[in-house]
Image (cartoon, rainbow, N blue to C red):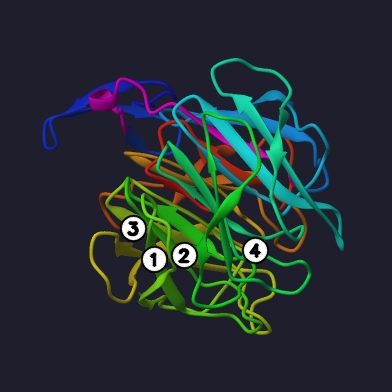
Amino acid sequence: MTVKAGSIRFNTDTTRMEIYNGEAWWEIDIDHASAGRGFFMGGTPTPDRIDFISMDFGGTATDFGNLSTGRFTGGAFASQTRAVYVAGEFAPGAETNLVDYITMSSAGDAKSFGDLIGTRRYTLLAVSNKTRGITGGGGTPTRVNTLDYFTISTQGNSSDFGDLLTAVTSPFSAQSATRAIMSGGTTPSNSTAIEFFTMTSLGNATDFGDLTVARASGGGGSNSTRAVFMGGTVVPSSPNGVDTIDYVEISTTGNAIDFGNTATSKNGADGGCASPNRICQGGGNNPSAISQIDGVRPQTTGNAIDFGDLSAARTYAFGTSNSHGGVSM
């Protein structure tokens, strides 16, 4: 019998409800009422675009609105109600410190939030504990190790938080409710380093461990306990991207462990969004812009499946969600 997309079943092995997305059965996040929305913001060649997917069901992303000014290679974080997009580039070499926000429950264009204080930056990390949003690293175009924070509920400019151990561009990032993880990136060579800091207390990052493969410009996220890092670029051996997925347990320290592989090798797929049962990575290059969204279940290990598509193929879009354990920039 052919199973139709949207079919629902009860899995007696896991005692969970599941929905079929046309490719595989995915667990429905009943414990959290709804896994919420995952957002993909900016990117090239459509730098003002904002679209979203259901973190329960995936599928083709829906148009939400536009950024105040089109750009790419920024960072995004969120609370349960508000998503914030920080800095980026209008064009290669044209960095900005603009900060926009949207109210995630209502479609519409982004509004001005404030400014990232100091040098204008691109390819920076972004994380949040749903109250405080933190950005770090990035290029000016000189690499920096600065960490800055915003109070998500209050519009305004950033404040100094501390410093990363290393100046870095294009890192992965994810978080739990208290701890932020930064991994990989370019320093200027591809890095394996993983660092962490506690988001509730101002201060500097500390060494955590190493990735399985040195790389940059990938996507990742967490379910609040496990951080997953997907894809990325290994220069010069794999400029079009790799399919590596690895993970760490956020509450401990140590080296990353192999998780599986992405559905497609790609770089510039910085759009990561997450819920308790989903981590997704959207868009990227291989070698031109693609629209595919890959998805994994963070509780297990295994290869990613095709979870849907962006509304338009693009690279260097940045992701976040209103149900995240963590998101990557």
Q: Which residue is mark 1?
A: 196
Q: For the residues marked 3 and 4, what is the alpha-carbon distance in whole angstroms?
A: 20 Å
Asked if labels 4 and 1 touch by Cβ distance under 8 angstroms, the answer is: no
Q: Nearer the viewer, mark 1 or mark 3?
A: 1
> Which callout, 3 or 4, points at the residue further toward the start of the chain?
4
> Which callout, 2 or 1, points at the residue further toward the start of the chain?
2
**Can residue 157 be found in the magenta stretch?**
no
Secondary structure at badge 4 equals loop
> Which callout, 1 or 3, points at the residue further toward the start of the chain?
1
Q: Nearer the viewer, mark 2 or mark 3?
A: 2
Stretch in magenta: 27-43
Q: Residue furthest top?
A: 106
Asked if labels 1 and 2 touch by Cβ distance under 8 angstroms, the answer is: yes
Q: For the residues marked 2 and 4, what is the alpha-carbon distance in whole angstroms?
A: 18 Å
Q: Nearer the viewer, mark 1 or mark 4?
A: 1
Three-letter code for the amino acid on which mark 2 is drawn:
Met
In percent of width and height, residue 46 lies at: 81, 40
Q: Which residue is mark 4?
A: 267
Q: Which residue is mark 3?
A: 302
Q: Is residue 3 visible?
A: yes
Number of residues whose C-alpha sits closer than 10 Å to that of mark 1, classed few (under 14), some (14–19) or many (20 or more):
many
Secondary structure at badge 3 equals loop
Q: Nearer the viewer, mark 2 or mark 4?
A: 2
- Asked where in the image residue 60 lies, by quadrant, the reply is top right
| Viewer-nearest residue: 144 or 42 | 144
Three-letter code for the amino acid on which mark 1 is drawn:
Phe
- The residue shown at (29%, 59%) is 250
Three-letter code for the amino acid on which mark 4 is drawn:
Asn
Three-letter code for the amino acid on which mark 3 is drawn:
Gly
- The residue shown at (62%, 80%) is 187
